[in-house]
Amino acid sequence: MSDWSAIDRFLHTDPRDVGCEEAMGILHVYVDLAVTDPVEAARRYPGVAAHLRACGPCEQDFEGLLHAVRDPTE
Amino acid sequence: MVVPVNPGVDGSHASPRRLDPESDAWVRSLGGVGAEREAALSRLHGLLLRVARGELRRRAGQLRVEGPEFEDLAHQAADDALLAIVGKLGQFRAESQFTTWAYRFVVFEVSTKVGRHFWRDPEVRMDAEDWDRLPDRFGLAPATQSEWRELMDALRHAVDTELTDHQRQVFVALVLNAVPLDALVARLGTNRNAIYKTMFDARRKLRAALVAGGYLHQDTAGRS
């Protein structure tokens, strides 16, 4: 059996995924929670967490905002 | 730069939550007048500029700019973010720290500018269809071609038969030609959510076709 996991992951869609607009609309709320408790952030906003796992650009924005909040002087 | 005076700050947009002291100070200063407001604008711009530089450095692999051009992009992002923040100050709901809410604008500005910057490379093509790249996009090695050839053929067939013209265009750009999503957004004059939704629907269709053809099992992907 070949390793088709990359294709399988790519084609998988999570019905909880809220999409870019909704996820980015509350990104500041999610980040303020995630900076101290990422597990709680994902538990409270499962649709945002699902989206960040699937959308590279939004995940990059999430990481960027997390960096900025942790150290804006970076 | 010219920043409009107190746009959007009025009683009808009062925050439904109690502001923390630091956020309260930001909102009061930026919503005020005179020297205090100017000082707050200057201080916020300085913070936004630092975040913009940090973000551009983090995305250096996508951007490949340095020196004056790097600084110019950072300043553009900070300037545009400051204008947006002041314009939407009345929309701040104290659901987060004020600075977290504000930094979000500059992060988004950097994303947009990096996406636009992508098209400065004249070698980049959006519509080329080199299907031989497809296995490589999924990390499939040529040495094991006999194992995945049939799956790749089925995937290509599904792209041709299951997707709408627009879904196919987006698939080709993002997957075959590795165009970044924000760059595609800039090229098509749309928004990230629209492209993501198009691709989301395309992925569902393709997966269903491959499951129906016996190439993938239902719900076999790793879930987290």
Image (cartoon, helix red, strand yellow):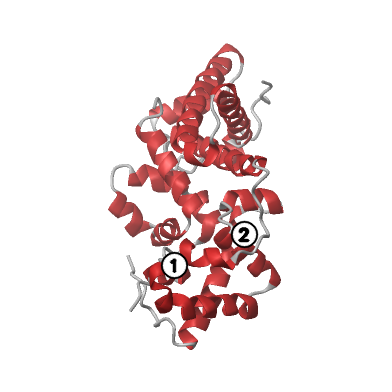
- Label 2–label 1 contact, CB within 8 A: no
Q: Is mark 2 on a helix, strand or loop?
A: helix
The picture places residue B179, in percent across and down from the top left corner, at 58, 53
Q: Kindly identify which chain the residue marked by label 2 belongs to.
A: B
Q: Quadrant of the C terminus of chain B?
A: bottom left
Q: Is B152 above or below relative to B35?
A: below
Cα separation between marks 2 and 1: 26 Å
Of the residues shown, which amino acid type is indicated by label 1?
Arg
**Quarter-of-image position of residue B159:** bottom right
Which residue corresponds to mark 2? B173
Q: In this view, does B114 lie to the left or right of B5?
A: left
Q: Quadrant of the N terminus of chain B?
A: top right
The picture places residue B62, in percent across and down from the top left corner, at 52, 42
**Quarter-of-image position of residue B160:** bottom right
Can residue B39 be seen in the rendering of this structure?
yes
Return the residue nearer the eye: B111 or B69: B69
Q: Is mark 1 on a helix, strand or loop?
A: loop
User: Are there few (<14), some (14-19), or many (20+) residues within 10 Å of tag 2?
Assistant: many
Give the residue drawn at x 59%, y 79%: B157
Q: In this view, does B100 lie to the left or right of A35?
A: right
Return the residue nearer the eye: B89 or B105: B105
Give the residue drawn at x 57%, y 65%: B199
Q: Kindly identify which chain the residue marked by label 1 belongs to.
A: A
Of the residues shown, which amino acid type is indicated by label 2?
Ala
The picture places residue B104, in percent across and down from the top left corner, at 50, 39
The picture places residue A46, in percent across and down from the top left corner, at 38, 61
- Residue that sits furthest to the top in the current view: B35
Which residue corresponds to mark 1? A16
